Amino acid sequence: MKKSPYTGLALITQVGLNILLPILGCMLLGAWLDKKTGGSGLFLLLLTLLGIAAGVMNILRLGKKL
């Protein structure tokens, strides 16, 4: 069966969003927490690393589905 040309585009978009959204969400949360607590950037750093790990886990899960 012939695949649609949009299948590849959908996969690329899904990979990008699965990486980008957790990282950006965690960065925003970390920046907000630092602003609220008067922190030195520790929350931003820790939550950004957590977002990166979450993005990698999302891609690994997506890869297993393919």
Image (cartoon, grey):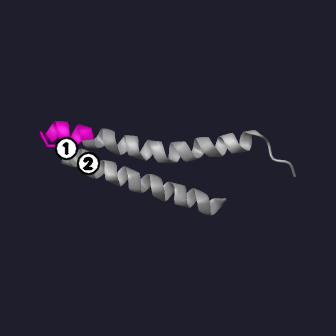
- Residue 30 picture quarter: top left
In magenta segment, residue 52: no
Where is residue 13? Give x, y as percent: 59, 41
Residue 57 sits above or below residue 13 on the image? below
Q: Which residue is mark 1?
A: 41
Residue 31 sits above or below residue 50 on the image? above
Q: Secondary structure at mark 1?
A: loop
Where is residue 38? Give x, y as percent: 12, 39
Which residue is painted at 48% across and 47% down in the image?
19
Where is residue 64? Give x, y as percent: 61, 63
Q: Is residue 37 left or right of residue 19?
A: left
Q: Secondary structure at mark 2?
A: helix
Label 2, label 1: how far apart the Cα atoms are: 6 Å
- The magenta segment is 31-41
Which residue is painted at 77% across and 40% down in the image?
5
- Residue 25 picture quarter: top left
Where is residue 62? Give x, y as percent: 58, 56
Picture mark count: 2
In magenta segment, residue 37: yes
Q: Which residue is mark 2?
A: 45
User: Disc 2 vs disc 1: Cβ atoms closer than 8 Å?
Assistant: yes
Mark 1, other Cα within 10 Å: few <14 / some 14–19 / many ≥20? few
Mark 2, other Cα within 10 Å: few <14 / some 14–19 / many ≥20? some
Which residue is painted at 79% across and 42% down in the image?
4
Q: Amino acid at mark 1?
A: Gly
- Find the residue positioned furthest to the right: 1
Q: Amino acid at mark 2?
A: Leu
In what quadrant of the picture does the C terminus appear?
bottom right
- Find the residue positioned furthest to the left: 38
Which residue is painted at 45% across and 52% down in the image?
55
Residue 15's disc number: none
